[in-house]
């Protein structure tokens, strides 16, 4: 995975309607998870864009994708995506960061209102494999 460049960060900032800071262009690294599909580097994405896995889940459940994303995302915090379309996002409805596999199925959650997902404290959702992940913020 290619980590974001200044040009990508500028592009995210210009496309976003929020007051997202340049600090939000940091990448994250998920490690140690029993769910191997969610381990790896994740690049920041525009908070107004919708993760492919999220769209897949909405389609399967017959939910309106745009409405659900606006309901669950705050439209300010970036979400993060890996090359395989696993993603990490903050859910304003429950105040938790979620780590979702490429299908859109949630695997791990943590209650935290920070700008970035926390390093530890993750809980597995039913069926998620242990060990639990850690998340590292990648400084550019």
Image: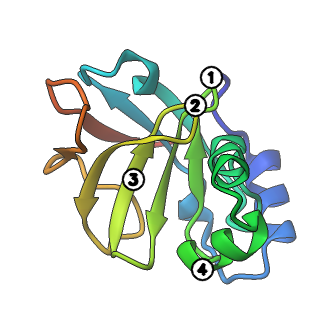
Q: Secondary structure at mark 1?
A: loop
Residue 40 image point, x, y percent: 45, 23
Sort mark 1 into few (<14), some (14-19) or many (20+) by Cα contacts within 10 Å: some
At a point 70% along the width and 43% down the height, the residue shown is: 56
State the CA–CA distance, disc 1 to disc 3: 16 Å
At a point 36% along the width and 59% down the height, the residue shown is: 97
Q: Is residue 43 above or below residue 50?
A: above
Residue 4 image point, x, y percent: 68, 39
**Residue identified by numbered label 4:** 71
Residue 33 image point, x, y percent: 26, 24
State the CA–CA distance, disc 3 to disc 4: 15 Å
CB within 8 Å, label 2 to label 3: no
State the CA–CA distance, disc 2 to disc 4: 21 Å
CB within 8 Å, label 1 to label 2: yes
At a point 72% along the width and 42% down the height, the residue shown is: 52
State the CA–CA distance, disc 1 to disc 4: 25 Å
**Residue identified by numbered label 3:** 98
Tell which tag, 1 or 2, sits nearer the viewer: 2
Circle nearer the N terminus (2, 4): 4
Circle nearer the N terminus (1, 2): 1
Q: Is residue 14 above or below residue 38?
A: below
**Residue identified by numbered label 1:** 84
Q: Secondary structure at mark 2?
A: loop
Q: Is residue 61 left or right of residue 108?
A: right
Which quadrant is the N terminus positioned in? top right
């Amino acid at each position: 995975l290619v980590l974001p460049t200044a040009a990508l960060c500028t592009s995210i900032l210009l496309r976003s309607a929020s007051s997202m800071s340049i600090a939000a262009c940091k990448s994250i690294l998920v490690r140690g998870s029993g769910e191997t599909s969610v381990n790896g580097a994740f690049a920041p994405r525009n908070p107004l864009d919708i993760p492919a896995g999220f769209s897949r889940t909405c389609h399967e459940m017959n939910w309106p994708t745009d409405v659900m994303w606006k309901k669950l995302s705050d439209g300010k915090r970036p979400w993060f995506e890996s090359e395989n379309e696993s993603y990490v996002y903050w859910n304003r409805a429950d105040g938790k960061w979620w780590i979702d596999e490429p299908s859109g199925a949630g695997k791990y959650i943590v209650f935290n209102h920070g700008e970035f997902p926390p390093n530890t404290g993750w809980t597995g959702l039913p069926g998620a494999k242990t060990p639990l992940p850690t998340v590292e913020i990648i400084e550019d």
